[in-house]
Amino acid sequence: MSKANEPQGRDLFDAAATRELAHNAPLAERLRPRSLDEMVGQERILGAGRALRRLVERHELPSIILFGPPGSGKTTLARVLASGVAAEFESLSAVMSGVKELRAVVERALERRKYHQRRTVLFIDEIHRFNKAQQDALLPHVESGLLVLIGATTENPSFEVNAALLSRCRVFVLEALGVTELVALLERALADQTRGLGTRGVSAPATALEAIARTSYGDARKALTTLELACDLALAAGRQALDTGLVEEAAQHKTLLYDKGGEEHFNVVSAFIKSLRGSDPDAAVYWMTRMLEAGETPRFILRRMVILASEDIGNADPRALSVAVSALQAFELVGLPEGVLPMTQAAIYLACAPKSNTVLTTYAKARNDVRSGGALPVPARLRNAASGLMKSLGYGDGYKYPHDFAGNYVREAYLPDELRGHVYCEPSEQGEEAAMRARLDAVRGKKPLGP
């Protein structure tokens, strides 16, 4: 073979090897989206008319940080974005790379811009692992526009990325994929004859695909890997259809009975709420864990705890609401799997807190009077005299300003005249409501206010 023919021979060999590698690549890699239209989920940032899609459609791409949980599509989106603006894609891992590797990328980017007028997109996976010196070395090349940075992180970039670098990037938040989105992705994988599993002829009922989706916790890569292994197990056993047993074996995870749209879903949620209300932290955490392990959305559970903190605890322990809301915020910050810790902390606190439904009953009584009595007039003395005419009509006449009296209190009627004497708020004797009840009894004239 002549030297003139060697490059062509190598090109043919390399092309054949590339095709072989692609054929044997894991399903998640073969099915990696190649355009924005193939992306599943993330409608909040990629939907029609959304900022990121509009930028790509205009062939514009600023430096960005993609913040989201594992398997939400950060790496895939980075590749799609680079392709969408016809830029060269370079990739570094913050765990494996340092300043030396970064310099090599910079040199290639300079040559590419000088000789080919082509932009370079640098994707840095786990950018939060870059130390300050590495981020400082990256900054001037992002600032000059030589590199379009796409950083991917599972940690809040506000805490992990230098302020100078972060100020030159736009942050886009990716969310864990929902069960419906994962099922759609799995259905596509089963049907795809070219890159997916379509040639294997394996079918799967909705229950099997939903089981895969629930045990993947929003991670598309994990869902596709489980599907591929389940199909391998099915064909090895001479079967052409998946079931939950094969899914459990493939996922190495017990598929729990928990249909989000069925009776068992409501049964487990009910048991969780009743355990919190009944002051049983052991049962509460058990039912919460059942829901999480079955793939329930953590935000659903956290929202239920926020509601319970007011409905069943209220002012018996006013801190309960803060704990529940803080747990929700903490989960939004760290995600899974660590997010289960503030969830568990909140569940324990709410279960152990003193209980009162005064908030619920007070609102219910007031609502009943509003609905039955309609829009009753505001007493004149309570109206705001914002103009001379209003003053002439008697607005504000006779109003007693509490701070003008001893103890900053004066007996006054604040309800509409038709509802005078109606009582809605009756604090319990539980926790801090006991002191509230004593104070309220005093101002209502049942007990002296004290010294």
Image: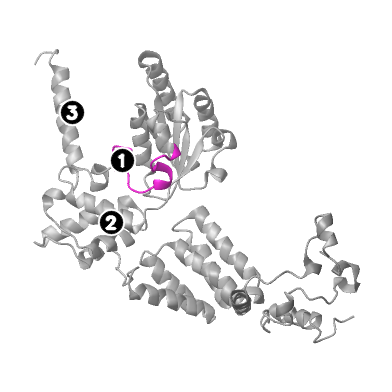
Q: In this view, does 30 lie above or below 235?
A: above
Please tell me how crowded label 2 is: few (under 14), some (14-19), or many (20+) other residues with Cα within 10 Å. Answer: many
Please give the name of the residue rendered at 44% of the width and 23% of the height, measured from the top-left corner: 106
Q: Mark 3 points at which residue?
A: 14
Q: How is the image coloured?
A: one colour
User: In the rendered image, is residue 358 in sight?
Assistant: yes
x and y, in percent, of residue 57 in the image: 38, 31
Q: Pointer 2 and pointer 3: residues touching (CB < 8 Å)?
A: no
Residue depicted at 39% across the width and 32% down the height: 56
Front tag of 2 and 1: 1
Q: Distance between the residues labelled 2 and 1?
A: 17 Å
Judged left or right of residue 25, residue 372 is: right
Please report the bounds of the magenta region as a residue range. Answer: 34-51
Q: Give the mark nearest the N terminus, 3 or 1.
A: 3
Q: Is residue 202 above or below residue 399?
A: above
What is the CA distance from the residue labelled 3 to the residue labelled 1? Answer: 30 Å
Q: Nearer the viewer, mark 2 or mark 3?
A: 2
Q: Where's residue 235, x and y in %? A: 12, 58
SS for tag 1? helix
Q: Name the residue under label 2.
A: 183
Residue for badge 1: 37
Quarter-of-image position of residue 267: bottom left
The N terminus - image quarter:
top left
Q: Quadrant of residue 392?
A: bottom right
Q: Does the magenta stretch include residue 68?
A: no
Helix, strand or loop at disc 2? helix
**Pick the front one: 160 or 276:** 276
Disc 3 is placed on an element classified as helix
